[in-house]
Image: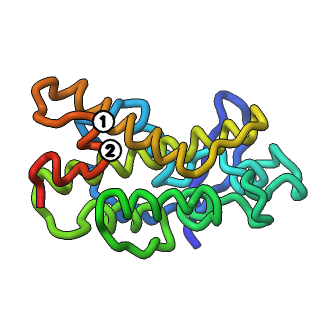
Amino acid sequence: MDYFIIYLHSETKVTTHPQVDLSVDAASIWHKDVPLKVVLFAWRLFRDRLSTKDNLLRRGVINHDSRTCVAGCDIVESSSHLFLHCNILGSVWHSIYSWIGVSVSNSFSVPDHFNQFSYNGGIGNKRHSLLQVIWYATIWEIWKERNNRLFNGSESPVLHVVDRIKAISYMWLKEKYITLPFNFHGWWLSPFTILGIG
């Protein structure tokens, strides 16, 4: 396995981290309709640089007993587990698939999931772009829910997380395209139908 060295600030301490095989086209990551902080968050996620518990354990920040998923599923909290395979937080995707009317099986890795989700049902530019906006909104809200559970001790039902994804993706698009011909109710029911995207 290839490794590279990360230097931490000006300290002499170094740590190794497995090199990540990034299979996401860089041009696809920088989406103009998604806030920069969310794009940068995804960039870190694709490279497995988020403060998930497996990464914190590897860096010696937490101990072995604290490494399990915040949703209580007794599995190590890695990026792929948290965002895709967790019985609670990962299940958000099933509601998203139902909302947009697609059938997808979750990939093993987050970058593969991004590619699969983005090109679901064809490669039309509008559809591709809209799917990416929804994907970014989903990972952002899953992370926020994870942090809320971890740091505040409060949980939202999965359907509330999905509602927030619908709301934030709508807001991002309306901020960029004020004249877009859709309303929130239509977006809530079927984003592709209301935009006339097949």
Front residue (pair 189, 112): 189
In percent of the image, x 64 and y 42: which residue is there? 156
Q: Is residue 191 above or below residue 95?
A: above
- Residue 79: x and y, percent? 59, 57
Contact? badges 1 and 2 (CB < 8 Å): yes
- Residue 149: x and y, percent? 72, 41
Q: Which mark is residue 170?
A: 1
Q: Which mark is residue 33?
A: none
Using a 10 Å C-alpha cutoff, classify the residue at mark 2 as few (fewer than 14 neighbours), some (14 to 19) or many (20 or more). some
Q: Amino acid at mark 1?
A: Tyr
Q: Say whether disc 1 or disc 2 marks the residue closer to the N-terminus.
A: 1
In percent of the image, x 13 and y 46: which residue is there? 195
Front residue (pair 193, 149): 193
Front residue (pair 33, 181): 181
Q: Amino acid at mark 2?
A: Trp
Q: Which mark is residue 188?
A: 2
Q: Is residue 136 above or below residue 115?
A: above
In percent of the image, x 66 and y 28: which residue is there? 10
- Residue 144: x and y, percent? 58, 38
Give the colouring mode of the picture. rainbow
Could you tell me which quadrant the C terminus lies in? bottom left
Measure the C-alpha gap from mark 1 to mark 2. Answer: 9 Å
SS of the residue at dot 1? Answer: helix
Left or right for 39, reference 31: right
In percent of the image, x 59 and y 62: which residue is there? 18
- Residue 162: x and y, percent? 47, 48
SS of the residue at dot 2? Answer: helix
